[in-house]
Every structure is written in C-alpha cells, then in structure tokens.
Image (cartoon, helix red, strand yellow):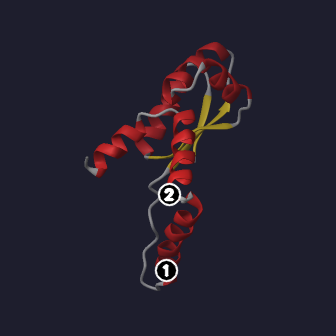
Amino acid sequence: MAVQDIITEIEKLNVLELVELTKTLQEKWGVSAAPVSAAAAAPAAAAEAAPAAAAEEKTEFDAVLTDVGPNKINVIKVVRELTGLGLKEAKAVVDEAPKPIKEAVSKEEAEKIAAKLAEAGAKVTVK
C-alpha cells in the first residue's frame, strides 16, 4: 500500500478513531507525536536563522467555530457532517464555542468549512 493511500484512509477517520489509532501506534511501537513535533520545528528554526530565507507562507490553517448563531441544531448537523463526530460529541463542540472544528488543513478546506457553517448561521474564523 502506497503512503498516499494510507494518508487517504486516515483522512476518512473521525476524531475518536484517530485517537484510537494514535494510542494503538504508541502502544505497539512505543512512539509518540511529541518527538515528531520537535523534529518538525527544527527545520523551521533553521530556515528562520538563514539570512537569505524568505518568509514562509502559511500552509496549514485552523477553522475555529467562534459563534453558533440562532440555528444551533443546523450548526450541530454541519459539524457532524464535517468532522464525522457523533451527535453528542458534535453538540459538545458547538456548546463549547469558540472551538476548533478542524486544525492544520489547507486554506481552501478551511474556507469551505467556514462557508458551510456560515450557511447554517454560525461564524467561523480561519486562523
């Protein structure tokens, strides 16, 4: 199976399944995400240290639900559709606004999320 196929399958998972996958990988191989984050930060720091390095364009964005608006039920439905969460989990996300809906996604995807939630009456900030 190619790496891109694996990534495609992981993208289909909902949040709870991703948590389960992470825990399973940590238990099976004794790895965690913390060292990966530190390793990813090192090249960025090196790029900033180089005098000729140009400012990097932001490639990952977060779609954050900032205001639910008057149509809470419709917003919950859209959150469920976008995240794959169950009713209870989606309601909790909406009730706890401001709350990220999706993190580290492309600008286009974040804007699509914002547009869908805006149709339902919610306000979303793309960071």
Q: Amino acid at mark 1?
A: Ala
- Say whether residue 71 is visible: no
Q: Which residue is mark 2?
A: 29
Q: Is residue 109 left or right of residue 67?
A: left
Q: Which mark is residue 46?
A: 1
Q: Amino acid at mark 2?
A: Trp
Q: Is residue 90 left or right of residue 58?
A: right
Q: Nearer the viewer, residue 87 or 120?
A: 87
Mark 1 or 2, nearer chain start: 2
- Whole-percent x, y for residue 119 in the image: 52, 20
Q: Residue at x 67, y 24 (%)?
A: 68
Q: Is residue 12 left or right of residue 68?
A: left
- Say whether residue 112 is visible: yes
The nearer-to-camera label among 1 and 2 is: 2
Could you tell me which secondary element the residue under label 2 belongs to? helix
Q: Residue at x 51, y 78 (%)?
A: 48
Q: Is residue 113 above or below residue 36?
A: above
Residue at the far bottom in the pictured view: 51
Residue 11's image quarter? top left
Q: Is residue 112 above or below residue 86?
A: below
Could you tell me which secondary element the residue under label 1 belongs to? helix
Q: Residue at x 68, y 26 (%)?
A: 94
Q: Nearer the viewer, residue 29 or 38?
A: 29
Total tally of numbered discs in the picture: 2
Q: Nearer the viewer, residue 77 or 88?
A: 88
Confirm or deny contact between disc 1 and disc 2 (CB under 8 A). Answer: no
Q: Which mark is residue 89?
A: none
